[in-house]
Amino acid sequence: VSGRVEVVAGPMFAGKTEELLRRVRRAEVAGRRVEVVSHALDTRRGAGQVSSHAGAAVPSRVADRAEEVATGRDPRTELLAVDEAQFFGPELVDVVERLADDGLVVVVAGLDVTYDGRPFEPVATLSALAERADRLLAVCTVCGEDAPFHVRVVADHDDPSSATVAGHVGGAEKYQARCREHFDPVPGPA
Ligand code: ADP
Ligand code: MG
């Protein structure tokens, strides 16, 4: 068994999806059987695609719940990549560990920090339990320094859609990457 967990973590715009897709391409070059999984809520390019802010995209199997990441897989899959892991919730931790125990290489990319500056599960925990965890940084939209955080630029109370999880899905129209000095999160709901 040569299973392991690799985590690609960080704030929005850090290049997590680009790194995930890079690892997927390398595994394909190596002749491994690869499966890419995304969440039904990841609709940047329409469901069924993992796409980066810079435009790269690959087709993906869509799962609604953490358990489906495992149950829906092709039994021959050797490397399983999960993007936007935060959509799957804390239940993803056990699912990923079981897959790795079963011999799969599991690459998990997602946010490990919320826009109001708190640890974000399951990626925060998976980072601690992985063979390898890389935390990538974005570029601060104010000053150009490395950005470990992101802020929501549309306040929750100005955006009715934020009452739902789906309403938090978004890109540059809703979020900006920030360094520590310029991270001044809009307080979320208590
Ligand atoms: P993530 O999955 O971490 O949100 P992506 O891999 O989708 O990030 O996109 C990273 C790309 O986003 C960068 O290569 C760059 O082209 C673009 N980008 C846009 N805004 C920023 C920013 N503030 N900081 C870094 N990259 C940015
Ligand atoms: Mg991404």
Image: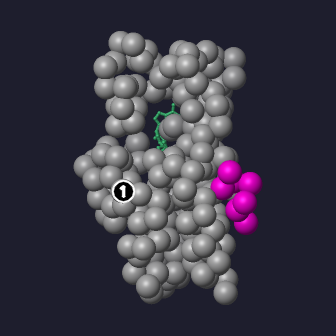
In the image shown, does 136 or 5 lie closer to the viewer?
Answer: 5
Amino acid under label 1? Asp
Q: Residues within 10 Å of mark 1 (few under 14, many from 20)?
A: few
Q: Residue furthest top?
A: 158
| Residue at numbered disc 1 | 64
Instruction: Determine whether 19 is above or below 33 in the image.
Output: above
Instruction: Determine whether 96 is above or below 12 in the image.
Output: below
Magenta span contains residue 127: yes
| Residue 109 visible here | no
Asked which quadrant contains residue 35, the reply is: bottom left
Q: Could you tell whether 22 is left or right of 119 in the image? A: left
Q: Could you tell whether 39 is left or right of 16 in the image? A: left
- The total number of labels drawn is 1
Instruction: Determine whether 151 is above or below 24 in the image.
Output: above
In the rendered image, residue 181, in percent from the top left (x then y), is placed at 69, 17
User: Quick one: SS at disc 1?
Assistant: loop
**Residue at the spot 60% in from the left edge and 45% down from the top edge:** 121
Asked which quadrant contains residue 50, the reply is: bottom left
* Helix, strand or loop: magenta stretch: helix
In the rendered image, residue 184, in percent from the top left (x then y), is placed at 61, 15
Quadrant in which the N terminus is drawn: bottom right
In the rendered image, residue 183, in percent from the top left (x then y), is placed at 63, 19
**Residue at the spot 39% in from the left edge and 36% down from the top edge:** 165
Residue range in magenta is 125-131
Instruction: Determine whether 109 is above or below 53 in the image.
Output: below
Mark 1 residue's CB less than 8 Å from ligand 2? no
| Residue 189 visible here | yes
**Residue at the spot 60% in from the left edge and 73% down from the top edge:** 98
In the rendered image, residue 114, in percent from the top left (x then y), is placed at 57, 33
Q: Could you tell whether 97 is left or right of 54 in the image? A: right
Magenta span contains residue 130: yes
Quadrant in which the C terminus is drawn: top right
